[in-house]
Amino acid sequence: MTALLTRLLGRLPIGWLQLSHAPTRMAAAVAGVGFAAVLVLVQLGMMGALNSTVAQSYAPFRADLLISAHDARTLTDGSPLARRWIGPVLADSAVAAAAPLYLGKLDWRRADGSIATLTVYGLPVEAGRFAGPLLAGRLPDLAARDVALIDRQTRGIDPAALAGVRPDAPLRFEVQGRTLTAIGSFRLGGGFSADGALIVSDQTFLRLFPQRIGGTPSHLLVDLHPGMSAGSAATRLQAALDASAVQVRTLPAAIAADLRYQTTQRPTGLIFGFGVAIGVVVGVVIVYQVLSTDVANHLREYATFKAMGYPHRQLLSFVFEEAAILAVLGLIPALLLALVIYAGMASATGLPVAMTPLRAVTVSLGTLAACLLSGALAARRLRAADPAELF
Amino acid sequence: MPPIRVQGLQHAFGLGEARRPALSDIDVTIEAGQLTLLMGPSGSGKTTLLTLMGCLREVQAGSVQLLGHELRGAAASQKDTLRRRLGFIFQAHNLHPALSARQNVRMGLEVHGPGDPARQSAAVDHLLNLLGLGQRLDHRPAQLSGGQRQRVAIARALIGNPAIVYADEPTAALDHDSGMTVVQLLKALGRERGTTTVMVTHDHRIRALADRVLLLEDGRLIGDHRGG
């Protein structure tokens, strides 16, 4: 290691030599950096899972525009929307089609007594153009009364068991006092507020949720003619409709707003955000403490280097070298441990908790930056190294 | 041009009523290649004078010219540059405990910037061999005796071929023969390379080898004996 660093730096690796001279202290520092990085990675993993589940909740359908009630901040909250808005929407020359989307949640009490909360998507069977890739061509199959497609990633249920659900091998189960017949499955996965999903026709949806009336879907899906600008159409429709009652957004804009709301205003997102901040602070404090103590312990040696003619910036480079080494040595086990924790969390919760290259790179750079910040703070003590005190 | 010229030098420690003079009206010029001893009782100002001449302390009043440069009011970068032309041998060695003997000495070379690593290593090993440490190259200070540490510190001071060597009791930790060897080495450097040595010492055995002895008492220069 010393030879490698000597070659890399073009000088003796004083930082490494100082750290490795006190292996116990170095191990504690590396563990501290690693702990902070794991904390950040776990929180970001949960945040990533939240983002993924929010984005994937839009996967069962597709549209150019999404029209929602004015108070809708996510896909599943907000007031129902008056279906009558379809008329003025279809009157716009850019609009090719529009369809209602119904959303609700129900609890599926299973034979073993466990309960799975399912998000129910209701779409008109004739609105095939609004089916997402995972439903392509399957909406007409839902025309029969009380049939559904079930999410085979539903939390707490063996995916293999649901994967075998077919029209000739249906799954019958009771929800909301009605017997539903699942005639097929799709792969979506649960989120933070539901364990899985069901897709049904709008008629079946209204039977499952009798308190909802047909004239009040959750959203309106809008498709534009080819070549039409979704952004321009959204602006035009928003101006044409009552802004105090509805909001018209492109689908990507609606997803982005949902993500923003969930991560910055909902408690779950805020908790994960605080977790990341605490991890960063813990990391900075630990590394600062280690480096600060190290600088204090080596003040005499630093004063000697000053007497020899080493400029202050060179002494700073020794401290930063230590900070960078602690960052790298702490990161390697942290990334490996985070992979193990992610696998455990994904297995236990069914959430899409996974490492992404971007997150690994971001946390690595962040850890390095935090360590260098700590080094910069600790390096202030170098000023106390007075070569005149050596005699 | 003499390597060290001191004129009207005054220095004090403390502030206000606690201010105590350490040096008063020091005028001295030290010639190149000479071994000069600073002697005197404890508290006489020897070490303060050494640190002022060695560019390690701010000059408060008077003038110290080092290698042709005025130190009073000199910029930090200029002081760094000047210090790289000096060698220091401390009584307490001040070796880095995390570095081997070889690495400690190498720090005396690396301060001059990157060089040919193989050539640097050869120069370090040669000097340590010359000082009888050929079998201790990779030992850390904690694994060396006091005398061996002092020899490593001497090697570190000399490896960069300094114009001036400042030494504070360099023979204190050495036996008589080793001490004499070190002083002879410093004398030889003066003869062969023109290296100037200024040494604080209480060791009267060295006096006979010195070119000049400056005696201090109560911060004043009270004697200037030329010998050799």
Image: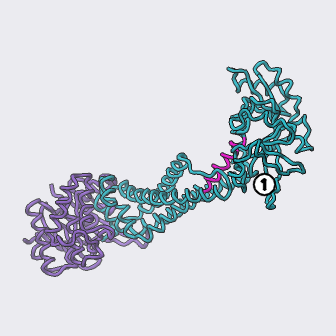
Q: Position of residue A129 (x, y in %)?
A: 74, 29
Of the pair A160 and A282, the residue shown nearer to us:
A160
Taking the magenta stretch, the answer to whether it contains residue A67 is no
Residue B50 vertical position relative to residue A122 in the rendered view, above or below: below
Residue at numbered disc 1: A116
- Residue B223 relative to residue A319: left or right: left
Tell me the chief SS of the magenta region.
Answer: helix
Three-letter code for the amino acid on which mark 1 is drawn: Ala
Measuring 71% from the left and 34% from the top, which residue is drawn there?
A136
Name the spot of residue B77 as percent of width and height, x first: 32, 52
Q: Which residues are magenta?
A: A42-57
Q: Is residue A5 left or right of residue A370?
A: left
For chain A, the rendered hue is cyan
Q: Residue at x 52, y 56 (%)?
A: A335
Neighbours of disc 1 within 10 Å: few (<14), some (14-19), many (20+): many
Shade of chain B as shown in the rendered figure: purple
Residue at point 33% right, 53% down? A9
Q: Residue at x 38, y 61 (%)?
A: A15
